[in-house]
Amino acid sequence: MASQAVEVEKKYDVGQDAEVPSLAEIPGVTRVGEPHVETLEAVYFDTRSHTLASRDITLRRRTGGVDAGWHLKLPAQGPGSDEESGDAAGGSGSEPRRRRELHAPLGQPGVVPDSLLAHVLAYLRGEDAAPVVRLKTQRTAYALYGEDGVHLADLADDHVSAELLGAAGGAGGAGAAVGEAAAPEGEARTRQWREWELELVHGSPELFPGAEEILAAAGALPAKHGSKLAKVLALPAKESGAAAGPKSPGPKSLGPKSPGKKGPVSDLLNAYLAQQISEILAHDPGVRLEEPEAVHDLRSATRRARSALQAYRRFYNALAVRHLGTELKWLGRVLGVPRDAEVILDRLRGHMAELPPELASAVKDRLEDDLGVGRDAAHRKLQMAMVSARYFQLLDGVEAFLDNPPVRPGAAAPARKAAVKLVAKAAKRLERAARTAKRTRRGAEHETALHQVRKDAKRLRHVAESVEPVHGKHATKIAKAARSQQQILGDFHDSVVARDLLANLAAAPDLPEAVASAYVTLHTRQVQLAAEAEAEYWKERKKSRKVLRGKVI
């Protein structure tokens, strides 16, 4: 398992003859440690088209220094990430640059550890990561200490020599920045430069403004590139707020703009779909590494994307929507089988605890065996699907849809007005489904009708979520009401599935009496829980009718 940390740093271009200033003058710094000199050598891995680097991802194997090993650096996620700080470009603005950093042992020189490879397969999409750049760095590090001896940060004075490997390109002919020595003619595959890097250890970001004044006075300028690799490959810094874009760098990688009340309705779907592809990419590694809830989270993002796509389909090319919807449905099903099996197994484990000890012990191992085989087979099938060309083409397809939305003329309609109709349509669909369920007789037909209500509640929830940028709290209130109905009917559905499963298990020939008795008891419990969930749903529907009927928004 790879270890993780969040790297918070700022880089500066600096001349070859610049002198390191008195770092003790930085506000908050009370002592500077003795300079520590080390030689680092790193080989960076990427595709021929620099797929990882174009997404601000670096994968390297480094020898020398205290953290020798494999390093994977990814854009930070959540509060304080690059997207939120407004500085995805690399710390050249007022805020420092934040990235997630994962470490793994040195291992073999050309074999990327599985614990790191799992985090980039969704970006490589079938391509191999091979050596593209070798960096040799002569580093002089200065530890900065505050009051009580707290290690605030490290300043690294790096003299860097870079060599392009294999078919890597992009450095030739690039203009030399401050502190960079242009390669002699005929040697464009090598570059040398000097840079300073200020990285927090236990200090806070408040250290950076004062430090920047001191470093600037010594001739340092904010770096034009976010990483050493990006500098070698001459990749442009990403714009602030950039989303995960296409596989190659370029203006399309900026992602969809935030929807505005006066903007077109297509902005709503583009923004919502961009959120979901970001969630899919974020949870992809967790599924590969079998982390708890990762399958659920990836499935939820897939369902949201498909649900919103269906709701907005009249604004887009029908063939494009149908194809993307079909592929998202396929992924949802592949994710759903192991997830549903795990949910049912967890549900029955909890209810086994309610049984008398002698019944619980009699049925526990048998139930684990009966359900575990199917669950494990579904997980294996899922892992195979996630390295398939079909999965990678789906990811490409969603990003291509965002880069070049196949809109119809109606997609230019004002977002705020169109959103009202979208939500109203979804709410009416839910109301019709609920009335149908109320009219149907008890039994399989009734249960199927309630399952349809659940699906329509889910669609309304997702549509309401997508229009929150233009309808705010009103849309949030609708999404919350729909979510309540969806969750209650989800419990109902789980009870029905568990009930039918237990009925089949109890019907098996030659069952030990204790096991058969336990199955009957658990079956009776699921029947009771299904009835309770349905009763709760009708109460919740009555409670939310004021929110979901009429004009809605």
Image (tube, rainbow, N blue to C red):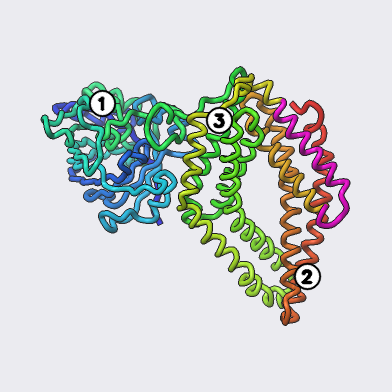
**Nearer the observer, disc 3 or disc 1?**
3
Q: Position of residue 126 (x, y in %)?
A: 40, 49
Magenta part of the chain: 421-445
The answer to which of 198 and 274 lies nearer the viewer is 274
Which residue in the protein does label 3 denote? 270
Q: CA distance from mark 2 to mark 1?
A: 73 Å
The answer to which of 144 and 383 lies nearer the viewer is 383
For image coordinates 22% across by 27% down, the residue present is 174
Q: Position of residue 156 (x, y in %)?
A: 24, 37
**Nearer the observer, disc 2 or disc 1?**
2
* Residue 547 counted in the magenta span: no
N-terminal of the pair, mark 2 or mark 3, is 3
Callout 1: 10 Å neighbours few (<14), some, many (20+)?
many
The answer to which of 214 and 490 lies nearer the viewer is 490
Which residue in the protein does label 1 denote? 215
Q: CA distance from mark 3 to mark 1?
A: 42 Å
Q: Quadrant of residue 251?
A: top left
Q: Is residue 251 above or below residue 232?
A: above
Which residue in the protein does label 2 denote? 521
Helix, strand or loop at mark 1: helix
Q: CA distance from mark 2 to mark 3?
A: 49 Å
Tag 2: residue type? Thr
